[in-house]
Each structure stands twice: as structure tokens, then as C-alpha cells.
Image (cartoon, grey):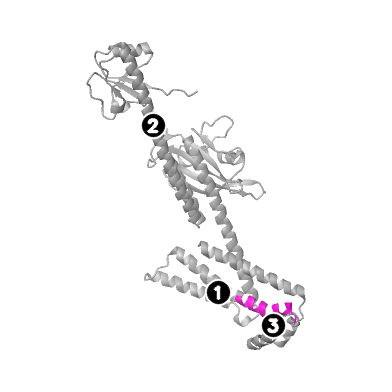
């Protein structure tokens, strides 16, 4: 059953003892004198003298009954007028809700695109917090990522924080995943928490904000804490918003918190949870890309080091060329005539470093092709005169005969090992190509 909304009826000054006031009393409808139109609370019906002009902004909710109307007619007029006002108020609410949902849909699209495009984890975390604060008018926000402590217990690491009223408050620390803190409780139970007052939480839930407030001279009141779930639906962290404000640009003090801070709206919770989950997936993806990059860098560096040990006279050549070329590019940037920009320099660094290292990997492929692959075939079964071509290649490369004599009798297992090496090289090359495309 739908509960009727509170309805407010206002009488123009001088109508308190009129026939209209008597009809309202018969119907059990309380009325108050209209003193200041700015204080009218909706939904409302404003009753005026016959012919009286409605106050500005209240034209749609004003009624001026005829002077000679009977009580029966007044009752019917009041009933119809109240129904119309209620319908208009409901339509206005629906229009506001549709506008809010449309704005949220546009924001979700924009945020999804931005989350997938950003490659810097620090900037990504800052973007997540700024966006959530703007959508909820929150004064402060913090992002917590789940990690493992030295003793193996689950911990929450404060990865980033913002507060528009007191500036930078970030201090790196961890809290245990338990029910003693609001963020730990949220991650433990796995669902969102809305507090109207962090000092007076719902029964059975922990308080929040006191230590922070004592340290920075702040007052934490309303609070929204949302778990972050990755693509496996695992809770990998949490986002906490504090002090939803009436206006986003308001600067809070301990004195104005009671009047300027409001509760977070439950209707926004689904959108905030969706953004938090998108953020968790984006952070996971970025961490995965960083791991792939580190793995590939390690493989390339190990391969180059091993290859360069074969000839001490040219050892370190790739590293020296990389350092000199990168330094030259940076020097050109600093001149001021041609500027690559920070993102471009990152790509240049990666391209020069890996390209030079790949020249060494090319020697791996050539060595494998010349030394090992011919041992996989036999002259009587291979359909073309492979061995004559191989001899010409060996002569053009100036290969040592002893090396050839050692390579030819290799067993089939050794050849298979070579193929595995080639497969690994191509796999890492493929990963690197994907990384370049992502940049």
C-alpha cells in the first residue's frame, strides 16, 4: 500500500476566519498562514482571496475559490486542487529522477572510457576519487587496496586520499581486514555501508573518523564505504567517501558541518558501486600490464647479458647505445624547439631500450636457425637440397667447422628444445607488441 505524502496547506493572511478555513477544519486538514513565500514546503496548496495574484513561483500550486461558492463546492474544489498539486509534484520528481539517471548514464560512459585509457596507477586512483566526490558532493575520499601483511594476514593499504577542505592529508599506512574499522568491516562483510553520523553508527557496526578528526581538526559526519570487486567478484579493496555537502564548492569547518553536511543518497549507491567495480578491474589490469612489462624486461635483459658474454670486447654495447640515444632524445626535448612531452618520452624510452635489445634477440634467432634447425631433418627425407643451401649459408656466415660438426649430430630432443626456445621468444615478442599498442 502506497503511503500518502505530507501535504502542506497555506492560507493568505486574513482567510483564517473565512468559510474556506471552516471547510478545511471540517475535512481535518491543518492550515498555516502564508507569511513568506520562500518558506513554502512542497507539496503544497496555497489558498488566496478571489482575484488575488499568486506569489511569484507559486502560480502552479495556488487556488483562489469564487467568493459565493458553497461549502460543497469548496470541498470539491479543494479535493481536485490537492490531487492536481500532488500529480504535478510527482511529475516533477519523476523528471528530476530521469535527469539524474541520464546524467549518471553519461558519467558512467565517460568514466569507463577514462578508466580504460589511463595507464598511470597514481593518476588512475586520483581520477577515481575525484569522480566519486563530484558525483556525490563528498568533501573527502580515500581508496584502499587489499594486500598481505608481513605475518600473512590480510591488510588494507591506503593507496590514495583527497579532502577539499583541509588539503593533502595522505599518509601511507595499513589497517587489518577486521570489524574494528569501517573500511575493514566493509571489506569483511562485502557490502556497502551508509552512515548518517560516523560517531553514532548503526548498532553492531564500528565508529569511524574520530582518530582522523583529532589529528586534523576535522569533523566526519556522513560516510559511504563501498567495496571494490574485480572481474572474479572478489573484494580487492574499498572506496570511502565522507561528508556529502549541499554544494560541492563549500569548504567545511567544524562549525558549519551541522548545517552544510547531508546524508549520502541511497539512490546513488548502485552507481557508486558500479564505478568502484570498474575501478577495481582497471587497477587489476594496470597491475597485470606492469607485471608483463617487468617480466619481458627481465627476459630481454637476461638474454642480452648472456649473449654479450660470448664476446667480452663488445660486451655492454646494447646498454651503451640505449643510454646514449635516450640521453640525446632528452637533450633535444630540453632545448625547447622540439618537445616530445612526458608521455612521448616514455614511449621513446621503451622503444629505444627494447629495440636495441631486440637486435640481440635477433642474433638468438639466427643462431638457432643456423645451428639447430638443420639437425631436425635428414638429407634422404627432406624434399629439397637443404644441405647444399645450408653449406652456402654456413660459408657466407663464416661459421667454424667445429661448431657445425658439433651441431649436426644433435639429437631430436635437443632440436625440440630449440623449438621451445623459439616459441618462448615469439611469445614474449607478441606480449611486447601488445604493450606498445596499449601505449
Across and down, in percent, residue 407 comes to: 73, 81
Magenta residues? 362-378
Q: Position of residue 192 (x, y in %)?
A: 55, 38
Dot 3: what SS? loop
Dot 2 or dot 1: first in sequence order is: 2
Residue 86, percent from left and from top: 38, 25
User: Where on the picture, by quarter, is residue 34?
Assistant: top left
**SS at circle 1:** helix
Q: Which residue is mark 2?
A: 91
Could one spot residue 172 in this view of the protein? no
Q: Is residue 324 left or right of residue 388?
A: left
The residue that label 1 is drawn on is 356
Going from N to C along the chain, the mark reached first, 1 or 3, is 1
Using the numbered discs, state the Cα–Cα distance from disc 1 to disc 3 in whole angstroms.
36 Å
Indicate left or right for 438 with 251 as reference: right
Magenta residues: mostly which secondary structure? helix
**Cβ–Cβ under 8 Å for marks 1 and 3:** no
Amino acid at each position: 500500500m502506497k503511503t500518502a505524502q505530507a501535504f502542506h496547506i497555506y492560507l493568505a493572511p486574513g482567510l483564517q476566519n473565512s468559510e474556506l478555513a471552516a471547510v478545511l477544519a471540517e475535512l481535518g486538514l491543518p492550515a498555516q498562514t502564508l507569511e513568506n513565500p520562500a518558506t513554502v514546503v512542497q507539496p503544497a496548496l496555497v489558498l488566496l482571496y478571489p482575484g488575488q495574484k499568486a506569489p511569484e513561483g507559486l502560480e502552479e500550486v495556488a487556488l483562489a475559490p469564487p467568493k459565493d461558492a458553497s461549502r460543497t463546492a469548496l470541498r470539491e474544489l479543494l479535493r481536485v486542487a490537492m490531487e492536481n498539486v500532488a500529480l504535478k509534484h510527482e511529475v516533477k520528481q519523476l523528471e528530476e529522477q530521469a535527469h539524474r539517471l541520464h546524467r549518471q548514464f553519461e558519467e558512467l560512459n565517460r568514466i569507463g572510457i577514462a578508466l580504460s585509457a589511463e595507464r598511470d596507477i597514481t593518476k588512475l586512483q586520483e581520477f577515481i576519487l575525484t569522480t566519486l566526490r563530484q558525483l556525490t558532493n563528498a568533501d573527502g575520499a580515500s581508496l584502499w587496496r587489499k594486500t598481505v601483511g608481513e605475518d600473512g594476514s590480510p591488510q588494507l593499504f591506503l593507496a590514495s586520499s583527497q579532502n577539499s577542505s583541509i588539503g593533502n592529508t595522505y599518509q601511507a599506512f595499513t589497517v587489518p581486514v577486521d570489524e574494528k574499522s569501517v573500511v575493514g568491516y566493509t571489506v569483511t562483510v562485502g557490502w556497502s555501508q551508509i552512515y548518517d553520523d560516523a560517531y553514532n553508527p548503526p548498532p553492531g557496526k564500528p565508529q569511524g573518523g574520530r582518530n582522523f578528526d583529532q589529528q586534523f581538526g576535522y569533523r566526519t559526519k556522513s560516510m559511504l564505504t563501498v567495496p571494490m570487486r574485480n572481474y572474479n567478484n572478489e573484494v580487492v579493496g574499498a572506496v570511502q567517501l565522507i561528508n556529502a555537502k549541499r554544494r560541492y564548492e563549500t569548504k567545511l569547518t567544524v562549525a558549519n558541518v551541522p548545517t552544510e553536511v547531508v546524508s549520502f543518497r541511497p539512490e546513488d549507491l548502485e552507481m557508486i558501486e558500479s564505478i568502484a567495480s570498474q575501478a577495481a578491474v582497471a587497477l587489476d589490469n594496470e597491475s597485470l600490464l606492469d607485471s608483463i612489462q617487468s617480466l619481458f624486461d627481465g627476459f630481454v635483459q637476461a638474454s642480452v647479458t648472456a649473449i654479450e658474454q660470448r664476446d667480452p670486447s663488445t660486451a655492454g654495447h646494447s646498454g651503451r647505445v640505449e643510454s646514449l640515444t635516450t640521453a640525446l632524445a632528452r637533450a633535444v626535448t630540453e632545448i625547447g624547439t622540439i618537445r616530445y612531452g612526458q608521455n612521448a618520452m616514455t614511449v621513446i624510452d621503451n622503444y629505444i631500450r627494447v629495440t636495441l635489445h631486440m637486435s640481440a634477440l635477433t642474433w638468438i634467432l639466427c643462431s638457432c636457425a643456423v645451428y639447430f634447425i638443420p639437425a631436425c631433418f635428414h638429407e634422404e627425407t627432406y624434399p629439397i637440397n637443404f644441405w647444399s643451401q645450408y653449406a652456402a649459408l654456413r660459408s657466407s656466415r663464416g661459421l667454424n667447422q667445429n661448431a657445425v660438426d658439433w651441431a649436426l649430430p644433435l639429437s631430436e630432443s635437443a632440436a625440440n628444445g630449440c623449438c621451445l626456445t623459439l616459441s618462448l621468444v615469439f611469445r614474449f615478442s607478441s606480449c611486447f607488441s601488445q604493450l606498445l599498442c596499449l601505449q
